[in-house]
Amino acid sequence: MERKKVTISDLMDKKEQGRKITMMTAYDYPTAQMVDQAGIDTILVGDSLGMVVLGYSSTVPVSMEEMLHHTKAVTRGTTYAFVIGDMPFMSYQISIEAAIENAGRFIKEGGCEAVKLEGGTEVAHIVKAIVTAGIPVCAHIGLTPQTATMLSGFKVQGKDAESARNLINSAKDLEKAGAFMIVMECIPNILASRITKELSIPTIGIGAGKDCGGQVLVYHDTVGLFERFTPKFVKQYIKLGPMIIDALKDYKKEVEEGKFPGEEHTFKMSKEEVEKI
């Protein structure tokens, strides 16, 4: 039986009913298919692809064209999950017009259902403009990787009273601007819990404790395919990396020893046809 595509209404219903929302990143067609078949509610085509797929040292170099390329692949592999495209650095900061145009490209060209952008109160007016243009926006506060340098690196945010109040205000301003959901990254669990309770829209945590409305992880971290570093908030459910390397070593050995391809992997001609050559 084919499942109905997840909608914003479905996500809001989960918030109201106290049911957790699941989110996972995906960057290509086969991964999107697997995440979709697992029944994950939402897929984020994150700009984290810059690090885990493209090999950049941060998310900053990721371009709109790269994001659209991967978003198209993900939406082609998805029939159930609600897909969110991550707006890359400088795709929404230059002007309102550029922000709306680039957000529109994610919907028209990428085929996703919504966009995500980083920032708090300072980007609320951008969120409002994109939403007014008819494009759903997921916000992102706390640790915002695109501007991690300004935050003095990849550190927990909101640990003192002033910065905690700023995050609370940002969350409320973003909700008021029309965001339908907020990702909260690397903030203390007690702060994330308070924000979640004070908002009428869902919150998604990543390193923000279990009281958020849902959780998101990077696919490559979750299945053990990215070993450059593993954040404290990541749980690896399987370590595929070593298993894949072992499989590739077995392939190399069998080729070198003449064991692959075997008879079962070989196409044959009849003896009569051979004689006609």
Image (cartoon, helix red, strand yellow):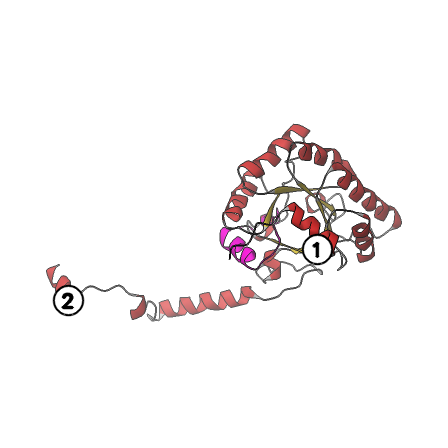
Instruction: Give the residues in magenta.
Output: 27-49
Residue 93 in sight:
no
At a point 11% along the width and 60% down the height, the residue shown is 276
Mark 1 / mark 2, whichever is N-terminal? 1
Task: Indicate the quadrant containing the C terminus: top left, top right, bottom left or bottom right.
Answer: bottom left
Closer to us: 126 or 157: 126
Label 1: which secondary element: strand
> What residue would you read off at disc 1?
214
Instruction: Give the residue drawn at x 86%, y 46%.
Output: 165
Number of the label disc, if any, that sits on residue 271:
2
Q: Quadrant of residue 205?
A: bottom right
Kindly identify the residue that appears in the image at 32 percent across and 66 percent down.
Answer: 265
Outermost residue toward the front in this view: 1
Residue 154: numbered disc: none
Measured from the top left, where is residue 197 in percent x and y?
81, 52
Q: What amino acid type should be assigned to the residue bearing mark 1?
A: Gly
Residue 63: horizontal and vertical position, in percent?
58, 39
Mark 1 surroundings within 10 Å by alpha-carbon count, few (fewer than 14), some (14 through 19), many (20 or more)? many
Dot 2 amino acid type = Lys
